[in-house]
């Protein structure tokens, strides 16, 4: 059974930083892609960023480029999302996700709340 557990959410003022962690258990993701999604109130869940652990390639949605950094620790089976220069529009529940061998986002964490206030 694959489990993803997020931690590190909270409240911060505009321009502040938060660091989210996602601990994976039950399967190593060293050959697959891990990522972060978010869902704001009244909106659909949207992709934020991903990392391919096999090669370390990363990809970000335009609105977070230059502010967010995703990284992986293979030894700890953990993915980290460093969020800087936070904006009110970053307020959402953030979900860690992992891809299956088919390349679909089949594994999800329970989510962690991020609130950015002005």
Image (tube, helix red, strand yellow):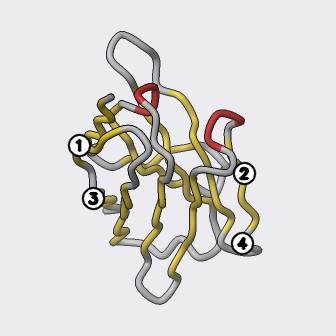
Residue highlighted by disc 4: 56
* Contact between labelled residues 4 and 2, with CB atoms less than 8 Å apart: no
Please state the horizontal and vertical placement of residue 97, each as a whole percent of the image.
Answer: 46, 50
- Lower position in the chain sequence, tag 3 or tag 4: 3
SS under mark 3: loop
Q: Quadrant of the C terminus?
A: top left
SS under mark 1: strand
Residue drawn at x 49%, y 39% is 37
Q: Badge 1: few (under 14), some or many (20 or more) residues near its Cα, within 10 Å? A: some
Residue highlighted by disc 2: 59
Residue 83 against residue 47 in the figure, above or below: below
Q: From the viewer's perspective, is 56 left or right of 113?
A: right
Tell me the mark number nearer the camera, choosing from 3 and 4: 3
Please state the horizontal and vertical placement of residue 92, each as a whole percent of the image.
Answer: 35, 31
Tag on residue 8? 3
* Contact between labelled residues 4 and 1, with CB atoms less than 8 Å apart: no
Q: From the viewer's perspective, is 95 left or right of 102?
A: left
Residue 44 against residue 7 in the figure, above or below: above
SS under mark 2: strand
Residue highlighted by disc 1: 11
CA gap between label 3 and label 4 equals 23 Å
Residue drawn at x 68%, y 51% is 66
Q: From the viewer's perspective, is 111 left or right of 70?
A: left
Q: Badge 3: few (under 14), some or many (20 or more) residues near its Cα, within 10 Å? A: some
CA gap between label 2 and label 1 equals 25 Å
- Lower position in the chain sequence, tag 2 or tag 1: 1
* Contact between labelled residues 1 and 2, with CB atoms less than 8 Å apart: no
Residue 47 against residue 45 in the figure, above or below: below
In this rendered view, identify the residue nearer to me: 27 or 63. Answer: 63
């Amino acid at each position: 059974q694959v489990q993803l557990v997020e931690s590190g959410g909270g409240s911060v003022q505009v321009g502040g930083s938060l660091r989210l962690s996602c601990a994976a258990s039950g399967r190593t993701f060293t050959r697959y892609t891990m990522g972060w999604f978010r869902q704001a109130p009244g909106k659909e869940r949207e992709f934020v960023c991903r990392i391919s652990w096999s090669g370390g390639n990363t990809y970000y949605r335009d609105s977070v480029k230059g502010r967010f950094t995703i990284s992986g620790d293979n030894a700890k089976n953990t993915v980290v999302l460093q969020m800087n220069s936070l904006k009110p529009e970053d307020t959402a529940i953030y979900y860690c996700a992992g891809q299956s061998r088919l390349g679909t986002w089949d594994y999800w964490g329970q989510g962690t709340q991020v609130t950015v206030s002005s």
